[in-house]
Amino acid sequence: MQATNGGRGGLSVRNVSKRYDPKGTMLAVDNCSVEIAPGELHVVVGPSGCGKTTLLNAIAGFHSISSGEIYLDHELLCGPGKPQATPGADRVVVFQNGALFPWKTVLENITYGPVIQKRMTKTEARDRARQKMAEAGLSGLEDSYPGELSSGMARRVEIVRALVNEPKVLLLDEPFRGMDNLTKSIMHESLLEIYDRNQVTIFFITHDIEEAIFLGSRISVMTTRPGRIKESIDVDIPRPRDYRVLTSDDFRGLMIRVIDAVHDEAQKAFEAGEREMA
């Protein structure tokens, strides 16, 4: 069951294509379409280089699209006459490599954005930050510095920092990549708790199929480059979820279905790479 958030954060990606290099000869994404409902935790999986991050960057406004349209809550982000979306606080990105200011405390990191953008006073931002930190199990770390935190705690701080801005969409680009399995498992449950509390639309990119099923309301499998949506799969596993769902028959059935869809594309990507090297 997806969150109910008053109808905020509906994304519509319609026939989007993206070409790279000055001559436009490298087609990264081709005629890609996906509809994401308000409050949905939508996960995108696919082989390396299939265009997952390209699509996320287009939604965020970090680069242009070559054709097609992207809408947020029925308002055009980018399309004909406006090839690049304007970055905004309604779409906040959490990257794989982290982006906390090491010279600022946790509280200063979380409050920096809304204060510098003059969206909140310093007092309002601090009150909001303390509330979100408490909800995420981070109370007591306000005066700590990023270098004093574990990787999981630091990533949780980044997610809270994003949510303080009250975005319509949270864009997560493989945020748990490189973590050990135990830390990743804890972060999965933590993210689901944050999601259930905040009812924000999440666009989540991963290579990890188990992660995709455990977290997602719906999974979109992308083809090898040029990327299109090959299949969208509903994850009909009740929430709240915890690690015990990993051994259920429903979970195993979804694993087989997603693996089948992704494996075919990974094989194509591998064969294409072998041809390019030949």
Image: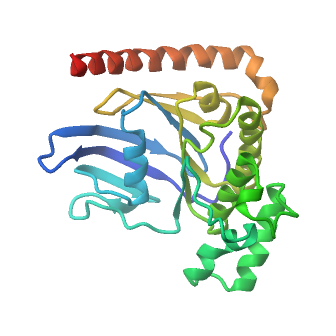
Q: Is residue 165 visible?
A: yes
Q: In terms of image quadrants, where is residue 186?
A: top right
Residue lying farthest left? 23
73 vs 116: above or below: above
Left or right: 238 with respect to 258?
Answer: right
Location of residue 13 in the rendering, given as x and y in whole percent from the top left corner: 38, 47
Q: How many numbered marks have been drawn onto this rendered protein structure?
A: 0
Front-lying residue, 102 or 203: 102
212 vs 252: above or below: below
Front-lying residue, 184 or 276: 276
Location of residue 241 in the rendering, given as x and y in whole percent from the top left corner: 77, 34
Q: Is residue 119 visible?
A: no
Q: How is the image coloured?
A: rainbow
Residue lying farthest right? 140
Location of residue 135 in the rendering, given as x and y in whole percent from the top left corner: 82, 58
Question: At x 63% / y 28%, what residue is drawn?
Answer: 213
159 vs 216: above or below: below
Q: In terms of image quadrants, where is residue 29?
A: top left
Location of residue 65 in the rendering, given as x and y in whole percent from the top left corner: 27, 52
Q: In terms of image quadrants, where is residue 61?
A: bottom left
127 vs 81: above or below: below
Question: At x 74% / y 34%, what residue is drawn?
Answer: 185
Left or right: 74 with respect to 175?
Answer: left
Please identify the quadrant where the N terminus is shown.
top right
Question: At x 77% / y 64%, what residue is drawn?
Answer: 132
Please identify the quadrant where the C terminus is shown.
top left
